[in-house]
Image (cartoon, rainbow, N blue to C red):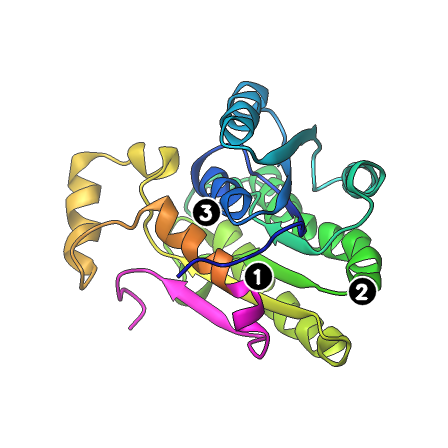
Amino acid sequence: MKMDLSNRIAIITGGAAGIGRSIALELAKQGCKIVINYHTSQIHADTLIEEITQFGGIALAVQADVGNIEDAKRLVQITLDTFGGLNILVNNAGIVADNLLLRMTEEQFDKVINTNLKGVWNMCKVALKPILKADYGRIVNISSVAGVLGNAGQTNYSAAKAGVIGLSKALAREVASRGVTVNVIAPGFIETAMTQTLNEELISHWKSSIPMKRFGLPIEVAKAVSFLVSEDAGYITGHVLEIDGGIVM
């Protein structure tokens, strides 16, 4: 099913690579004007802009650390100055700093919470006014099954991703009467650079735990985002969509 998002304006944080890259490409193909936020991946961002431009899409790359409120404000202001508004926010930026709790440092905890949870709060806060002013508004926050199930060695990451779910549900209640939807996607194991760092033994272990016996593809997450930001999903809000091959089932 092709979603028509012609002339909608979207920010995708962490949009230069992995899942974010697939989301940016998919929304651009549906007609969105895309602002790709990246923190350090400028080469990936520039390559993606070129790819979107080649098929006739419109995209802009903006460097910003979403965990910094001033950077978040600058990202949104550049979007408004360039495109004149904002309709869609996809909070995808995320990092990991895994360790067992007894070995995890306070710095590892703070770093992950700052990007993965406070970054979502920052972006929602600064983007909300222009989204409410627009005639169309959608927010999709990318969580993780780690925020639903928990994951050993990821107390920081699981806490942040669970926090994203609570934040999203609260915000969904705040803005529902204004016609803005806020939803969450919780991916399981998706084939990205992050999962490619796992050794073969771990990959085999996790695949055997997944009812569908495979990792997901970034495009499978992107297609779900495309649906949730479309008019067809106008009566869905505060929902957590797990894209995980059944691992949470």
Mark 1 residue element: loop
Where residue 45 sits, quadrant-wise, is top right
Residue 87's spot in the image, x, y percent?
71, 56
* Mark 2 crowdedness (10 Å alpha carbons): few <14, some 14-19, many ≥20: some
Q: Evaluate if marks 1 and 3 touch, with contact meaning CB atoms under 8 Å apart.
A: no
Residue 149 placement, left or right of 60: left
Q: Which residue is mark 3?
A: 102
Mark-to-mark CA distance, 3 and 2: 44 Å
- Which of the numbered marks, if any, corresponds to residue 53? none
Say which residue appears at 76% left-offset and 38% top-offset: 75
Q: Report the magenta residues as a range.
A: 228-249
Q: Is residue 242 above or below residue 125?
A: below
Amino acid, disc 1:
Val
Mark-to-mark CA distance, 2 and 1: 15 Å
- Which of the numbered marks, if any, corresponds to residue 229? 1
Q: Which residue is mark 2?
A: 132
Amino acid, disc 3:
Leu
Q: Is residue 249 above or below residue 163?
A: below
Q: Nearer the viewer, residue 185 or 229?
A: 229
Q: Quadrant of the N terminus?
A: bottom left
Where residue 175 sits, quadrant-wise, is bottom right
Residue 103's spot in the image, x, y percent?
46, 41
